[in-house]
Image (spheres, rainbow, N blue to C red):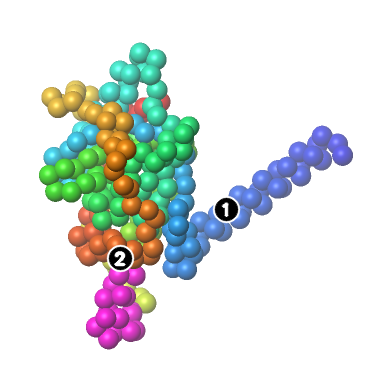
Amino acid sequence: MSTETELQVAVKTSAKKDSRKKDTLQDRSEATLIKRFKGEGVRYKAKLIGIDEVSAARGDKLCQDSMMKLKGVVAGARSKGEHKQKIFLTISFGGIKIFDEKTGALQHHHAVHEISYIAKDITDHRAFGYVCGKEGNHRFVAIKTAQAAEPVILDLRDLFQLIYELKQREELGKKGVYDVPKSQPVSAVTQLELFGDMSTPPDITSPPTPATPGDAFLPSSSQTLPGSADVFGSMSFGTAAVPSGYVAMGAVLPSF
């Protein structure tokens, strides 16, 4: 087989793989999504920019400022030859789990009901972050994905939408209402104002409160982390459990 023929075969094979991948991504039926998020869910390769204590559960400027602060810490560390921690994260019914890429050790686990806000960086297309934690103890987790962050955001959107709809159906079932309307003018997630835009200009000055490296929030060896939850598990699925805002983060200086 000539080199040219081999190249054509390789291109055709790659095209078929891409086509299958697109078909899979387009199939966002309930059955497909349940299968996608069961067990360990879907996995993404990334780097941990850092984790920052924040004053509230949500807010576009809050996420913007925190991302700026954490990227500033990364820039300072890079000048000393230090690099961001390589990780992989999983998205499942159990929430978001962050593992160290080298050791495979679980670093952080944030259950669905702990995540209150998700922000996408529209300037740095491989960056996004989310706010998690309980009242008075909120943290912003900044992630740099290996590829574009958009698929991660879409998976998170699908996960929360699916959980909300399953819970609504369960509640209606308890009340004796078994016929759940299939067509609604606006999705439940949209009704909860999960989407928004951010137009805050970049702030390159560091706020007075210091940012905290991601490893500062590692669980102690005695702490027991919850395992993968079932579709409903022990998680709370009330309206308050769904994050109140998926936002597009404004111009933030990209990290490398």
Label 1: how many residues lie within 10 Å, few (<14), some (14-19) or many (20+)? few
156 to the left or right of 199: right
Locate residue 113: give its quadrant.
bottom left
- The residue under the point 26% across, 64% down is 237
Q: Which region is colored magenta?
A: 163-181
Q: Quadrant of the C terminus?
A: top left
What residue is shown with label 2?
164
What secondary structure is marked by label 2? helix
Q: Nearer the viewer, mark 1 or mark 2?
A: 2
88 to the left or right of 200: right
Q: Position of residue 243 (x, y in %)?
A: 25, 54
Q: Residue furthest top?
A: 80
- The residue under the point 82% across, 34% down is 3
Q: Residue furthest bottom?
A: 176
Label 2: how many residues lie within 10 Å, few (<14), some (14-19) or many (20+)? some
Q: Position of residue 21 (x, y in %)?
A: 57, 53
Q: Is residue 137 magenta?
A: no
Q: What is the three-letter code of the residue carrying label 2?
A: Tyr
What residue is shown with label 1?
21
Q: Residue furthest right?
A: 1
Q: CA distance from mark 1 to mark 2?
A: 26 Å
Whether 256 is drawn above or below 16: the answer is: above
Q: Position of residue 87 (x, y in %)?
A: 43, 36
Q: Position of residue 31 (x, y in %)?
A: 47, 68
Characterize the magenta stretch by its predominant secondary structure.
helix
Q: Quadrant of the N terminus?
A: top right
Query: Is residue 174 visible in this depiction of the protein?
Result: yes
Q: What is the three-letter code of the residue carrying label 1?
A: Lys
Query: Is residue 201 visible in this depiction of the protein?
Result: no
Q: Is residue 170 magenta?
A: yes
- The residue under the point 27% across, 35% down is 217
